[in-house]
Image (spheres, rainbow, N blue to C red):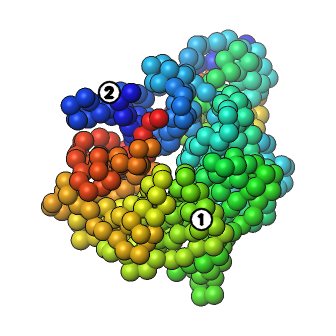
């Protein structure tokens, strides 16, 4: 099971409760989450299902590698954190 | 009901309302901190749509059913999956064109329950249920000429003007930056590229008149005489008397024929307003003197209107959606990139400053 949490910066726009979700890949974990929280999808992913350019997804404290297909494998007891990728000053 | 104005800015949506004493008050402020790129108040309805650009978190739509009392999140027009292996690149730089809504640039009401939405990177969307669901207009998106559209001020092309013919909601005409003028007579099923007579001076020799390479900054039509269109083009001011099929350029318009915004009187097709700027590297008022220009004779002559506008140097630029006229044909308003907002109650003869301290203004629209 994977623990999924989100940047507090999203809370002013959409509710993003922490969740413990099952899935073999980052994409599967997110899909499970969006099934319960459908509004969150468009804040994290673009129209093609890729991670938005200024959003970062950390898997066990490392940025995921596959930002378009979300195929990074997720082991048991993983932690996924979705944050803003801050750019600029 | 009091006359009301919606103002979309870099940091929120504001409502300015005319008071009984002839003043104007701030009567609403929503989405503070969030860029508002477009706003639509459906005619005769309490329903308002506001398009937000949340940057990191994408483009959103908010909808109010009670005139701004409460807002809820509404579905956003999204692109269908890009076919595997399909090459779709920006023609100028060879960048992959994102099949993702980057910015909602125009929102217009059509027939009952019908909405049109123009976006960057060049998609046109239609809703038949008041914005509950949206569909990309595939015949336009799939037209191979669409792939030749270029970015103007933004990275990718966009649809900024959507003219729905009040006589026939299936007749819709678009202004595209940079991709010319397009029209449909069957609600989007088929499209024609139109615009003979337009001229784009910055194109290579021989291509100035190519309809696909035209850079309209904004197109409006006269609601009571919708054959008449006015265009503020990158290269000048044009008008059409045949719903955009052919255009005539107005030259030697003082103090400059460069600008972004244009408004036309709702009942007098010969009366139109512009906010000129120095073309085109500077994009500030000519000689730093802010004026509005008005023609009352179909472009035969122009008056410079400045009473009530800043007497000293001003560096305000007015974006394409930031000049509006009310349905009464008397009230005009415009807002600038430096956060100033002016209103006129006499067709532009005199202006009053409503604020010099708003965030940069993207769009203004009278309600009702």
User: Label 2 crowding class (10 Å Cα cut-off): few <14, some 14-19, many 20+?
Assistant: some
Please report, as a chain letter, where disc 2 is located. B
Residue B293 horizontal side relative to residue B297, left or right: left
Would you place residue B234 above or below residue A89 in this image? below
Residues at discs 2 and 1 in contact (Cβ within 8 Å): no
Q: Residue at x 31, y 61 (%)?
A: B292
Please report, as a chain letter, where disc 1 is located. B
The quadrant the N terminus of chain B occupies is top left
Q: CA distance from mark 2 to mark 1?
A: 37 Å
Q: Locate residue B63: give its quadrant.
A: top right
Residue A72 horizontal side relative to residue B359, left or right: right
Task: Give the structural element (helix, strand or loop) at label 2.
Answer: strand
Per the image, the residue denoted by label 2 is: B27
Q: Residue at x 43, y 80 (%)?
A: B251
For discs 2 and 1, the disc positioned in front in the rendered view: 2
Residue B66 horizontal side relative to residue B290, left or right: right
Q: Locate residue B308: give its quadrant.
A: bottom left
- Where residue A58 appears, as percent x and y from the top left, is 60, 29
Taking the image as drawn, is residue A72 in sight? no
Q: Residue at x 25, y 41 (%)?
A: B354
Per the image, the residue denoted by label 1 is: B178
Q: Residue at x 71, y 53 (%)?
A: B171
Residue at the far left: name it: B312
Would you place residue B315 above or below residue B127 in this image? below
- Where residue B246 appears, as percent x and y from the top left, is 63, 73
Would you place residue B366 above or below residue B226 in this image? above
- Where residue A74 appears, as percent x and y from the top left, is 74, 24
Given residues B212 and A62, the one toward you in this image is B212
- Where residue B334 appears, as percent x and y from the top left, is 35, 50
User: Label 1 crowding class (10 Å Cα cut-off): few <14, some 14-19, many 20+?
Assistant: many
């Amino acid at each position: 099971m994977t623990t999924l949490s989100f940047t507090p910066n999203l809370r002013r726009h959409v509710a993003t409760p922490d969740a413990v979700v099952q899935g073999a890949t980052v994409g599967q974990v997110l899909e499970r989450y969006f099934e319960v929280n459908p509004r969150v999808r468009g804040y994290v992913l673009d129209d093609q299902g890729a991670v938005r350019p200024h959003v970062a997804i950390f898997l066990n404290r490392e940025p995921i590698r596959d930002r378009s297909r979300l195929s990074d494998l997720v082991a048991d007891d993983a932690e996924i954190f979705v944050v803003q990728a801050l750019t600029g000053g | 009901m009091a006359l009301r104005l919606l103002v979309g800015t870099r940091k929120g949506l504001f409502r300015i309302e005319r008071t009984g004493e002839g003043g104007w008050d701030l009567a609403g402020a929503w989405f503070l901190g969030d860029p508002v790129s477009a706003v639509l108040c459906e005619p005769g309805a309490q329903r308002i749509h506001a398009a937000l650009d949340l940057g990191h978190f994408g483009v959103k739509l908010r909808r109010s059913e009670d005139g701004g009392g409460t807002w809820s999140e509404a579905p956003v027009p999204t692109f269908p999956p890009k076919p595997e292996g399909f090459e779709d690149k920006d023609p100028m730089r060879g960048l992959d064109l994102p099949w993702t809504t980057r910015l909602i640039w125009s929102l217009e009401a059509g027939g009952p329950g019908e909405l049109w939405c123009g976006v960057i990177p060049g998609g046109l969307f239609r809703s038949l249920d008041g914005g509950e669901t949206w569909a990309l207009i595939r015949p336009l998106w799939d037209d191979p000429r669409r792939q030749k559209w270029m970015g103007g001020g933004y990275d990718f092309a966009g649809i900024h003007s959507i003219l729905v013919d009040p006589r026939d909601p299936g007749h819709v005409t678009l202004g595209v930056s940079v991709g010319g003028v397009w029209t449909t007579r069957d609600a989007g099923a088929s499209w024609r590229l139109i615009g003979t007579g337009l001229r784009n001076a910055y194109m290579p020799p021989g291509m100035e008149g190519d309809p696909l390479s035209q850079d309209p900054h904004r197109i409006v039509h006269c609601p009571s005489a919708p054959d008449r269109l006015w265009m503020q083009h990158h290269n000048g001011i044009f008008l059409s008397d045949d719903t955009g099929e052919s255009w005539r350029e107005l030259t030697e318009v003082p103090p400059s024929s460069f600008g972004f915004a244009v408004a036309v009187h709702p009942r007098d097709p010969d009366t139109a307003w512009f906010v000129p700027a120095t073309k085109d590297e500077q994009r500030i008022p000519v000689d730093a003197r802010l004026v509005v220009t008005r023609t009352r004779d179909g472009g035969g002559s122009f008056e410079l209107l400045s009473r009530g506008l800043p007497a000293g140097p001003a560096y305000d630029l007015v974006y394409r959606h930031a000049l509006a006229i009310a349905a009464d044909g008397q009230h005009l308003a415009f807002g600038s990139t430096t956060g100033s907002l002016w209103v006129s109650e006499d067709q532009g003869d005199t202006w009053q400053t409503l604020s010099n301290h708003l965030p940069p203004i993207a769009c203004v629209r009278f309600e009702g």
